[in-house]
Image (tube, coloured by chain):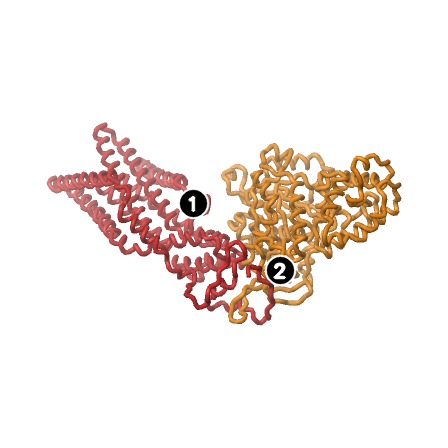
Chain colours: A orange, B red
Amino acid sequence: MPLSLPGYAGDWLERSLDRQVRLAVTGLSRAGKTAFLTSLVNQLRHAGLDARLDMMNCAREGRLLGAQRQTQPDLSVPRFPYDQALAALEGTPPAWPPATRGISELRLLIRYKSRTNSRHFLGEQRTLTLDLIDYPGEWLLDLPMLRQSYHQWCEALSAQLTGRRRRFAEGFLNQVSALDPAGTADEQQLADISAEYARSLNTARNEGGYTWVQPGRFLLPGELDGAPVLQFFPWPLEQLGDPAALAELPADSNYQTLARRFEHYKRTVIGPFYRQHFRRFDRQIVLVDVLSALNAGPDVFDDLRHAIATLMQSFDYGSRSLLSRLFNPRIDRLAIAATKADHVTPEQHDNLLSLVQALMAEPLRDLRYADIPVKSLSLAAIRATQARTVEHEGKRHPALKGTTQSGEEVLMFPGEVPPRLPDADFWQRQGFDFTAFRPAPQTSGEALPHIRMDSALDWLLGDKLR
Amino acid sequence: MNDPRPGRRFDVQDDATAKKTTAPEAPAFEQHFVPVDPAPGARYQLDSVHHPLEEEAPPEQIDSALDHALAKPKKRRWGLLSVLAGTLIMGGVQAVETFQNAWFGGDWVSGAWSVLGLGVVTLAGTSLTKELFRLKRLRRHARLREDIDTRIMDTQMDGDRMKALCDRLRQQMGLGNRDPHWQDFLQAHQAHHNARETRDLFGHYVLAPRDASARRLITRMSSETALLVAISPVTLIDMGLMAWRNLRMIDRLAALYGLELGYASRLRLFRAVLANMAFAGASELATEVSMDLLSMNLASRLSSRAGQGMASGLLTARLGIRTLKMLRPLPFEDDRAPKLSDLRRQLWQQMKRVDDGKAGKGRADNV
């Protein structure tokens, strides 16, 4: 990372005074990371004016003065496309911000009035620097690969290749069964099979709704498209023999070539991504889109649970001290958010929350063991619907009013959210069908409507804004 | 039967949110939602007897528990009672003596002072008697606060019900519908806020301004008490002042929150008032005696009087904080409760200001 010395020293000073926070916005693809970041910048820019941040202590006491975007420290990384996202939201018809295709950074300077006693000699106005990064959620899935060898990776993926997933990978499995691990590697053949594998991943994600698709770069290759580093695939375990015999194979064999590419992928693609963007976090918010997973069925739901539990192991958690803040930052506070809370009626929020807690049960236990404060909340970074009450057949029902993705205006009750995953025979009888809404038309220049962005901000940053 | 309800669509014309003027049929709606797995669901006949949550039949146990507790106090406060009785008798003897001396000595000014003092004592006496009468009348209100407390602790309550409860609190506090604080709260409250968030918002937008004025009131009245007790020379007047100012403060605080004190809490506060009186009386006697015994000079006499006054002021402030905590319709959030240390600083500053003023005046006289 090219950094000038004064800038670096300034960062250090800020960090030692605890006036710099790096917030990790973690979420798989389509969990709403970009919408969250857009809304976060928007709310803080409009704080004290027309943004409704009533659950944020600093804002409702009138001490939050606003925020400004700043040039990010790493000039080689693109800036977060806030204006484009806002333009999409304010367009006609309004649309969600486009999917993220690469890494972008954003530095936000939050200005506030201090209430602590030190304000008498340190000055009342303070600035908190908030660093945010946005990245394609697909790439996040690669992080667990860092701890695996090629053989372990094949083992893990083969175990998952069941049911519907196997059907999506049918073409790839046929092609790979013709390949001999010990045979001499043919560049073109490996490239073809890799392309077929990438195709199967795309179908599994787009049609099946699966979130756990590795390697993530296959879905969004960016500038690596067509490079040999992306031409490998997991070998189904039943076609591989004894691991010891495989290790003996010559370097130009199919198996060894793939293993070498896997290691290279880990070293040159995942490694830098992890080191530069994922190690130095102070706070984290995990965005989970439970409703889509419910829509897709029980296996996808399990898949999501597995994906998140594995992902959470890639972050450092622990309480902070001055030293750890400077040399080895760790996440000392965490929020877990069930996103798209505006897609269900308000009285279902409690259920949504307990469902997301059930989904995250495993990581939550570890976090509790590490004594990290966690708050879970139902959240909609940009509220797309309005909560209404409907009189239907003489009774009152809660309902939502909004516009679906296809442009049809509806008034509907989207269905009850189960407080935990329903059992198998419920899925046989009936499934879920939560409708996707498109954003409500926004007046240009006004703060975006939201659900509990203020609570989330208060939990993540409130103790720094005192 | 325990499955989550499927989604459904309605006609856009059916939207009834705007027509919310009629009371929402909360029970019917409640029955429609059969709880999913955790709590086994129960369906009731639509024609079975049911009430809206607000007018729920009160549980009988609270009242009887209260009766029980009141009928047989576990501990007689003999110490407090004897100090109180002792100081009352001694104070009475002292007052008669002062009055007699003034009468026979033809000292009209001090006689007038005694009459004034008797006036204060009478005022305190009437407050105390009124209080005793009111205790009986207020007994049926005892339930109110406990009721609100238990309901707020109930996390099952949704935001709308909580909002309705907040509306009732507003009416009780005597705030109009157009009150700016209430309007702020209404603007801040959104459909998705749950009971806890609604309570938080109500606390911040409607109660916090009241808390601030309550705090000011306590500081003001306790410093007044401190000054009055410091300058009054007679024990009985000290005690009378203490009773009068303390009860007055409790009343004004209650008026500020528009909440009538519960029977039990008033009894507790009343006991605190009695304890304060006993302290004021005893400390006044002790100061007198020690001043005579140690034959202090004028300056140390004054300072010991000031110390006695300061202590009385602090006791009053403490009573005020206790009252505030009991009166506030919603309990204080974690660290927002007023602390005696904050008030002590303010009280001390106020006393010092008076002192400085006196000193400044003294200097002006000398010049």
| Residue, far left | B104
x and y percent of residue A456 in the render? 58, 49
Q: Nearer the viewer, mark 1 or mark 2?
A: 2
Q: Tell me if residue B14 can be seen.
A: yes
Q: Is residue B57 above or below residue A131?
A: below
State how many labels appear: 2
Looking at the picture, tell me which residue is in the foreground, A320 or A435: A435
Q: CB atoms at circles 1 and 2 under 8 Å apart?
A: no
Give the residue pinned by disc 2.
A384
Task: Give the number of the disc on residue B337.
Answer: 1
Q: Estimate the spatial distance between the alpha carbons at disc 1 and disc 2, rounded to whole Å.
A: 39 Å
Q: Nearer the viewer, residue A222 or A357?
A: A357
Q: Disc 2 residue type?
A: Ala
Q: Are marks 1 and 2 on the same chain?
A: no
The quarter of the rendered structure image containing the N terminus of chain B is: bottom right
Relative height, residue A18 to residue B66 (above, below): above
Query: Horizontal and vertical percent for residue A177?
Result: 83, 48
Q: Please give left or right for residue A77 compared with residue A340 in the image.
A: right
Q: Which mark is residue B106?
A: none
Label 1 is placed on what type of residue? Ala
